[in-house]
Image (spheres, helix red, strand yellow):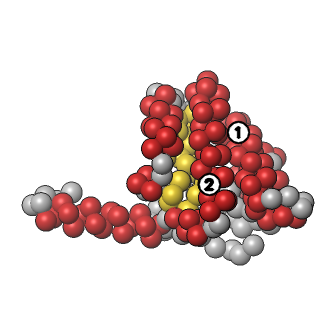
Amino acid sequence: MDGNGRWATQRGRPRLFGHHAGARRVREIVETCPEIGVEYLTIFAFSTENWKRTQVEVAGLMSLFRRYISKETRALNSFGVRVRFIGDRMRLDDKLIRLMSQLENATAGNTRVHLTIALNYGGRDEVARATKRLAQDLADGRTSGEARISNFLLWQSAYAEYEFIDTLWPDFTSAEFEALCADYGGRDRRFGGIK
């Protein structure tokens, strides 16, 4: 969900205005998913690098996340969306963590759309935390504007195909989402020509 702050700045508004517009856009995109055959959607809401933003912006984003979860839980559940969060919850406040867990639990039985929200997430951070967990398991005697991905799902995206578009998230419509998915579905792949 890139470009919220730039979108607001282009309109002479504060950056948080853009974040609110971006949050409203999520519902439209999620509701479009079943219509175009998308079962799994991951959105990057807040990266580990976003803590470097101003204190006012970070506090505003955290407040927005709490309000969004409280307001959208019923709609997401009734639409059949299963919500999961990825990212490090340790730095988030207790109320937000509780709301995230409640949303995950409330939607756990849904299967229409699987929505993953990356919150306080970073690809490098995820790999580092997994490595630390593995090292701990072993110690315990057990085994177990730019075209960039901004540290998003590094491990999971090893063979991903990307579309870099100029549209800022608050302007990203379901029609544009549908067109991108249709283009993706119509491509010939190198591995056996499978669409």
Q: For the point 12% across and 60% down, which residue is it?
A: 140
**Number of the label disc, if any, that sits on residue 27:** 1
Residue 127 percent location from the top left of the image: 38, 67
Residue 35 in sight here: yes
Instruction: Locate the N terminus by quadrant.
Output: bottom right
Q: Earlier in the sequence, mark 1 or mark 2?
A: 1
Q: For the point 45% across and 44% down, which residue is it?
A: 94
Q: Determine contact: label 1, label 2, CB under 8 Å.
A: no
Of the residues shown, which amino acid type is indicated by label 2? Ala
Residue 17 percent location from the top left of the image: 79, 52
Residue under circle 2? Answer: 59
In this view, which residue lies farthest toward the bottom?
146
Q: For the point 52% across and 64% down, which residue is it?
A: 48
Element type where label 1 sits in the image: helix
In this view, which residue lies farthest toward the left?
141
In this view, the residue in front, 142 or 156, is: 142
In this view, the residue in front, 31 or 39, is: 31
Work out whether 112 lies above or below 183: above
Q: CA distance from mark 1 to mark 2?
A: 23 Å
Residue 36 horizontal side relative to residue 44, left or right? right
Work out whether 8 lies above or below 67: below
Residue 37 in sight here: no
Residue 134 percent location from the top left of the image: 24, 63
Q: Which of pointers 1 and 2 indicates the residue nearer the eye?
A: 2
